Image (cartoon, rainbow, N blue to C red):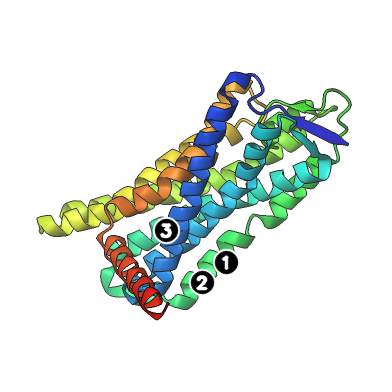
Amino acid sequence: MEFVLLGFSDVPQLRWVLFGVFLFMYLVVLTCNGIIIIITKMDSALQTPMYFFLSNFSFLEICYVTITGPRMLMDLCTQKGNISAFACAAQMCLFLVFGSTECLLLAVMAYDRYVAICHPLHYGLVMNPKFCTQLVTACWVSSLPVVIGQTWVISCFPFCGSNRIGHFFCDVPPVLKLACGDTTRIETEICIAAVVFIVVPSLLIIVSYGKIITTILRMSSASGRAKASSACSSHLVVVVLFYGTATITYLQPKPNQSGGVGKLICLFYTVLIPTLNPLIYTLRNKDIAVALRTLLRKLSSLGKDFKTQG
């Protein structure tokens, strides 16, 4: 069986404009997150739990966008959108795995900031390398059984009507809309999974930041308050953007909104937010700015040495 992704076929006059914009955003995601991964691995000053989690988050963002980005660009070029049932199921499964992992990792990053600000004397003991690795591993593997099971159930539904998916990738709501038979049970299971992987982590983040804000307000030093606030503000912005759009989509697996609104919301958390995330995290981060300048100096020095030898 084969599906057809309609994508942006309803606005053919904007095809190349959209292609240029999305290509630029995808390259920004690859470049900026790649730079973050490199400098956090190379600079010894960034060998801390916070940057360990940030480098994992950057790698996750690259994976997350790559699941949908290249396919969307190809469909804009070819205007075909044909995708096999297996490829559609694989895309859906990987997208949900990476999305669930991102939800959990954002909660872990909030916990890291909570320990750093509320219990600074115990930070090194609590957030030791072994524990940090265990947390990241748990984020990556926790959703696998649930997502694989739900993808299998969805793929087993008969699709006896139209095979045209009103979306630019195989997401759960538009695919379920094409399924024949009663989808109530799987929709309920998806809502439960959304509660586990979206609502529960968001509650943990709210609790963590509630305690963080309380601690910051109790600080006597204005510079200490500013430093603590700066360390948390970027993460909080990312959390609000990502969780807000994901909640709207997956707590209502049977779409009640129009296809256009659904695609617009998806564009926010599949393209726009991942493009903004590395900028949000690095814009006010002095440590990364210093590490980036150091890296550029090293590259410049290597370039000069290469020319001299040539």
Q: Quadrant of the N terminus?
A: top right
Task: Locate residue 115: give its quadrant.
Answer: bottom left
Above or below: residue 114 compared with residue 214:
below
Real-space Cα distance between discs 1 and 3? 14 Å
Circle 3 Cα neighbour tier, 10 Å, few/some/many (<14 / 14–19 / ≥20) = many
Q: Which numbered marker is on residue 137? A: 1
The residue at 82%/45% (across/down) is 86
- Near mark 1 (Cα within 10 A), the count class, few <14, some 14-19 or many ≥20, is few
Which residue reaches farthest bottom? 309
Q: Which residue is under mark 2?
A: 133
- Please indicate, yes or no, whether residue 273 appears anywhere in the rendered image: yes
Q: Which quadrant holds residue 47?
A: bottom left
Please indicate whether residue 102 sits to the left or right of residue 154 in the image: left
Q: Is residue 38 above or below residue 241?
A: below
Q: Which residue is mark 3?
A: 109
SS category of the residue bearing label 2: helix
**Label 2 neighbourhood size at 10 Å, few (<14), some (14-19), many (20+)?**
some
Q: Earlier in the sequence, mark 1 or mark 3?
A: 3
Q: Secondary structure at mark 3?
A: helix
- Kind of residue sitting beneath label 1: Thr
- Residue at 70 percent across and 27 percent down: it is 6
Residue furthest out toward the front: 310
Q: Secondary structure at mark 1?
A: helix
